Image (cartoon, rainbow, N blue to C red):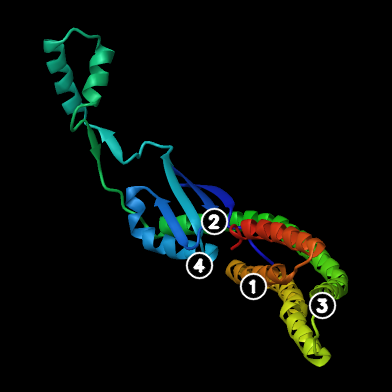
């Protein structure tokens, strides 16, 4: 089972005269990169919020926004009517403007708004944490859905890689025979007296250097291991990345030893499919 690092979650709750809304977006990242935007009176919860986000989301570029809207008459910011009235009288004396224009100018001047610090009670803390958990669960569900799509794509790529590996196994005997024939013909054209035993030893040595049997076996094992890790509990994206590196190493070695046009085509096709796997793995948790 794999999870995508891409996700979105949103939850909303009513608490007394407030409407609390939490939105979380996540993208791929090597670490847990959390950007938290919250009202100032919730700052004492920041450490707990970050800890909870990291516990459930593990890693990713995570943007968290908490919005608080006041529905009643208990907003923490009130207008200082005395200061506003004083500003309006002064503006009336120095400028010709309507009352609404003077009001707009006065409200932009210093000390017209009075913010009183808001107390954060235990009940509201619990409600914010519960809403965060609900939002995180929604985002994790989104990640699971994306992960299922990614898993199907990986299985398709693995099938295509194994198809090319099967073609290589079919081409291998012909490749060996062609190499032997090529060397024998080259020696015949030189018209040199060659010790048959020594020639056979050198031919075996040369063929062993070009042999790709071990690479084929290791490549098949890596592909099978990739399938097994796909079924493991997340997070498994980094482990899959390491397996992909090993797959690429075996494909490159087969390509360097190939010395066969059709076999090289198989290698090129395998590299193309592997690059697609690598691109998708960047988004796996």
Q: Is label 4 or label 1 in front?
A: 1
Residue 55 disc label: 4
**Foreground pick, 48 / 120:** 48
Residue displayed at 71% across by 74% down: 222
Query: Residue 28: which numbered mark, if any?
Result: 2
Residue 22: mark:
none
- What residue sits right under mark 1 in the picture? 246
Alpha carbon distance from label 4 to label 2: 16 Å
* Residue depth check, mark 2 versus mark 1: number of the one nearer the observer: 1
* Left or right: where 117 falls relative to 173: left
Considering only order in the chain, which callout, 3 or 1, is on the residue closer to the N terminus? 3
Residue 191's disc number: 3
Name the N-terminal-most of marks 4 and 3.
Answer: 4
Q: Which marked residue is nearer to the observer: mark 2 or mark 3?
A: 3
Query: Within the image, what quadrant is residue 264 found in?
Result: bottom right
Quarter the C terminus occupies = bottom right
Quarter of the rendering containing residue 125: bottom left
Residue at image point 75% right, 69% down? 258
Spatial CA span between label 1 and label 3: 45 Å
């Amino acid at each position: 089972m794999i999870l995508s690092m891409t996700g979105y979650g949103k939850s909303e709750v009513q608490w007394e005269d407030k409407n609390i809304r939490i939105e979380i977006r996540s993208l791929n990242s090597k670490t847990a990169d959390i950007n938290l935007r919250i009202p100032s009176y919730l700052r004492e919860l920041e450490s707990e919020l970050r800890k909870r986000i990291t516990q459930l989301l593990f890693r990713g570029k995570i943007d968290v926004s908490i919005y608080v809207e006041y529905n009643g008459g208990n907003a923490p910011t009130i207008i200082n009517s005395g200061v506003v009235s004083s500003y309006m009288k002064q503006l009336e004396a120095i400028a010709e403007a309507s009352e609404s224009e003077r009001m707009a100018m006065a409200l932009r001047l210093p000390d017209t708004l009075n913010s009183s610090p808001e107390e954060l009670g235990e009940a509201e803390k619990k409600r914010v944490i519960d809403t965060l958990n609900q939002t995180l669960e929604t985002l994790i569900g989104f990640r699971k859905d994306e992960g299922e799509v990614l898993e199907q794509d990986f299985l398709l790529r693995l099938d295509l890689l194994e198809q090319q590996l099967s073609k290589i196994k079919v081409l291998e005997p012909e490749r060996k025979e062609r190499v032997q024939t090529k060397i024998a013909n080259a020696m015949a054209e030189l018209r040199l007296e060659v010790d048959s035993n020594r020639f056979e030893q050198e031919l075996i040595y040369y063929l062993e250097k070009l042999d790709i049997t071990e690479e084929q076996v290791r490549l098949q094992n890596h592909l099978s291991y990739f399938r097994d890790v796909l079924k493991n509990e997340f997070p498994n994206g980094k482990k899959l990345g390491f397996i992909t590196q090993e797959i690429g190493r075996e494909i490159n070695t087969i390509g360097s030893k190939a010395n066969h046009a059709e076999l090289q085509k198989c290698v090129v096709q395998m590299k193309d499919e592997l690059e697609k796997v690598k691109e998708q793995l960047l988004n796996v948790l």
